[in-house]
Structures are given as C-alpha cells and as structure tokens.
Image (cartoon, rainbow, N blue to C red):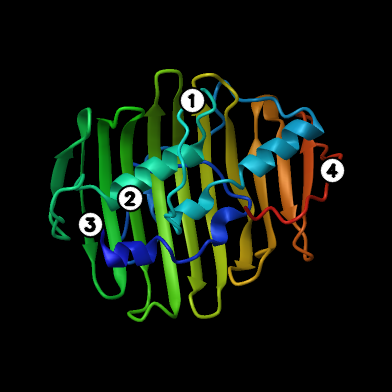
Amino acid sequence: MEDTKMNKFLTISTSTTLLLGAFLITGCSSSDDGGTTTPTTTASVPANAILIDSSAVAEDKVVEAVATGDIIVSAIPFGVETSTTLTGKDILNIAIDKVLNNNLGTSSLATGVAFSEPCAVSGTISGDETETTTTYSATVTFNACNDGSITLTGTIIINATFTATDDGPYTVNASGNLTATTSTISVGFNGFRFDQSGNDSTGDYTITTFTYAIDPSTGGGYLVELTQPLVGNEFVSCQLTSGVVLVTGAAGSQARGTVNPDRTVKVEYHSGDGNFIETDNSPLACLLI
C-alpha cells in the first residue's frame, strides 16, 4: 500500500546506514507509542558462525554490519540479487517493499483493519497497521510468502512516533525474527531489536539498541550488538560521532568497530582469546554508503 504516513516513517533518516547490518524482524510484543519491543528469541552466535581470525575477516564483518540498518528508516528501493551471496540487505529490501505494498496492487487497505493477501506464487502476507497524526505501528506476517524468487517466513513489527508536521522529535523501534529462502540458500535473522530516537529538524539521532544474529544455511553467520549507543547527525556527510558495534563469531572470536570523534572507525579483532588488536587498515574512513 502507498501510505503517506508509513512512507514518512520509513524515510525519517538515513542515519542507521553506519555500523549496522543485515536484519529483519518478527514475532514480538510491542507498544503502540514507539516504546521498546520485546523479541521472542534472544540473539546468539549461530552454530555455523564464521571464525574472526584475521584483519580481512574483521574488517569485512564490520563493513557488512554497516550495510542495511538504514532500510528500517529509509525504504528506498534497491536492486535485489537473490543468489548464493544473498545478504540481509537484499532480504530487508524485499520485505519492506512488501510491507509498503501489502495489497499486492489491489485497492488500498484501510488502516487498523486486519488483512490477508495471497503472494505472487504461493503463501500469504497478513497483518494490520494503525496510524494517527503522530504515531505509526504495523505488524506484517509472511507465511511462506513466495514471490517467485524468494520465500519469506516471519513477522515484521514496526512502531514509530513523530510530530504531526514531521519536523520534530521521533522514535522508532522494531524486533523479531525472519527466514528467507531461495533455490540455493536459506538465511535466518534471529533475536533482532532496534531502538532509535532523533529529531527531524536538527538531524540528531541516537541508536540505543541494535542486535541480531544472521545465520545462513551455507555457514558464516555471526552476532551483532551495540556496546555503546551510536550517536550522529543525518545532515552531515559522515554521520556518526560515537558508538561501538561488536560482531561475535565462532569460538568467541570478535570484531569491534569504534567510531572516533573524527568520524573514522577503529576496527579491532581477536580470534577467541579476548585480546583485541587493531586491523591492518584501521582506522577505516567514514563507512556511510
């Protein structure tokens, strides 16, 4: 559906591009006023996680953890490639597009009313959304929803608050799990939680929570979480000024990205002994993409 308030919510800022990653959301309780959501699954390191044992791997995983957080607040269409390298960004683009167009081209659905629509090939997409001049919430469930190239299973839950004129404080939160499957790969996103507040007029924002586990069937999964809130301003070219993201892989190995005051990112890693060392190319330049 083409809902103006939902599109406003999904374009609040592009702030979460930095140091965020591939994710989707499902199956949680939530408040209607943008309060904290509660996931039904706690994110943990997947059984087939990657071992973070080199500068190259550490830098790659930190950069991957940058790629898709902006989609939660900026539903700009991108080309989606469904292949053996299927990313969370690909999956999130598809899912958000379906949330925005959950009537699959038919007449717009009334807000606050439950809906259930068939997907292009098989399965269904169902849920409801509610909006006022200052709040938005949506719950959309994918039940083996096959659009011909990818099958989604899970539920997206989104809550936001904002000013009626879209020029003041806002909050956004979401949480849950989702699985996406193609002919060659299945990717799970588990225990996702996301909480952000900001101000449309000043561009300032703070991301207090961003947690998820990515678990591809081909291996190489990892856990992402913040150990310090990400703080920045969407009106400048390199947005973040502080914050720390931690990526955990197999055997307790970790990569850590720390935003420096000059907006570069210090990247460190260890292969399981807890002794972080800085990577070869650290600090990385602004990771805004």
The residues bearing labels 4 and 1 have C-alpha atoms spaced at a distance of 29 Å
Query: Is 107 placed left or right of 237 in the picture?
Result: left
Q: Earlier in the sequence, mark 4 or mark 1?
A: 1
Q: Position of residue 255 (x, y in %)?
A: 72, 39
Please rate how many residues cluster around mark 4, counting C-alpha atoms within 10 Å: few if below 14, some from 14 to 19, many from 20.
few
Residue kind at label 1, given as amino acid type:
Ser
Frontmost of labels 4 and 3 is 4
Dividing the picture into quarters, in which one does residue 21 lie? top right
Residue 129 is tagged as 3
Q: Can residue 132 be seen from the camera position used here? A: yes
Whether residues under marks 3 and 2 lie with C-beta atoms below 8 angstroms apart, the answer is: no
Element under disc 4: loop
Q: Amino acid at mark 2?
A: Ile
Q: Secondary structure at mark 2?
A: strand
- Give the mark nearest the N terminus, 3 or 2: 3
| Crowd class of label 1 (few under 14; some 14 to 19; many from 20; radius 10 Å) | some
Q: Which residue is mark 1?
A: 83
Which of pointers 2 and 1 lies earlier in the amino acid sequence?
A: 1
Residue 34 in sight in this render = no
In the image shown, does 27 or 149 lie closer to the viewer?
A: 149
Residue 281, label in figure: 4
Q: Secondary structure at mark 1?
A: loop
Report x, y in % for residue 228: 65, 57
Q: Amino acid at mark 4?
A: Asn
| 3D distance between C-alphas at marks 2 and 1 | 26 Å
Graded by Cα atoms within 10 Å as few (under 14), some (14 to 19) or many (20 or more), the crowding at tag 3 reads: many
